[in-house]
Amino acid sequence: MNILHRDNHSPLLKESDNRVPVGAMTDVEICETKHPELVRDENTPPPQLRFSKLSSDAHIPTRGSSLAAGYDLYAAHETVLPAKGRGFVKTDIQIALPDGCYGRVAPRSGLALKNGIDVGAGVIDQDYRGNVGIVLFNFSDEDFKVQKGDRVAQLICERIYLPALEECESLDDTKRGANGYGSTGV
């Protein structure tokens, strides 16, 4: 299969174009091709995300749909996020992530769009066993009340790749070089 042109409905990618064409291999297909060891056999059960409730106020993480990337996390207690401020929300659950994974605490799109609520400090290391807490930022002009039982964030399990560090005198130059934010276009 040609990575640059998969079917008759996709435009060919010009050599000078640095964008990926519609119909090119997906990230998953590229990953499966380059890293077959990451492909799970149909007969192998999926890894387990184990959790424990720390109080009767805790809610079991849920997925909004069968194809949702993350598990919704629920507030175990009421709190108020001040306008243009931030707060800390506890879930009263602890988790044990699958081997080779970390947990990324991500925003819920509805809270972000409708209420200006975003998530900060969103990494849960594999060896953390404390109460999963969520830092929330309120970018709106009004206080936001988090009710006990509200879905406030989502937990996405992601694989960790830990390369060995190697200090170098200098690095290879690339076409992009040190050109940063916005340098590849809008």
Image (cartoon, grey):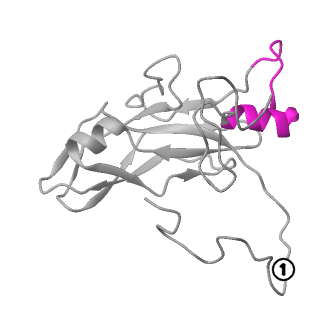
> Foreground residue, 124 or 115?
115
Mark 1: give few (<14), some (14-19) or many (20+) Cα within 10 Å: few
| Nearest the eye: 99 or 114 | 114
Judged left or right of residue 56, residue 168 is: right
> Is residue 33 among the parts visible in the rendering?
yes
The residue shown at (50%, 52%) is 122
Residue drawn 49% across the image and 45% down it? 105
> What residue is shown at x 51% (from left), y 38% (from top)?
155
Which residue corresponds to mark 1? 167
The amino acid at mark 1 is Glu
* Residue 92 visible in rendering: no
Q: Quadrant of residue 84?
A: bottom left
Instruction: Name the outermost residue toward the top.
Output: 43
Q: Which residues are magenta?
A: 27-45
Looking at the rendering, in which quadrant would you find the N terminus?
Answer: top right
| Position of the C terminus by quadrant | bottom left
Residue 8 point in image, percent of width and height: 64, 23
Q: Is residue 37 left or right of residue 49?
A: right
Element class at badge 1:
loop
Where residue 120 appears, as percent x and y from the top left, is 42, 56
**Is residue 143 on the magenta stretch?**
no
Q: Which of these two is toward me, 20 or 28?
A: 20
Residue 25: x and y in percent read: 69, 33
Quadrant in which residue 179 is drawn: bottom right
Q: In the displayed structure, would residue 60 be above or below residue 84?
A: above
Q: Is residue 93 above or below residue 179?
A: above
Asked if the stretch drawn in magenta spans residue 43, the answer is yes
Q: Nearer the viewer, residue 24 or 50?
A: 24
Residue 86 image point, x, y percent: 29, 59
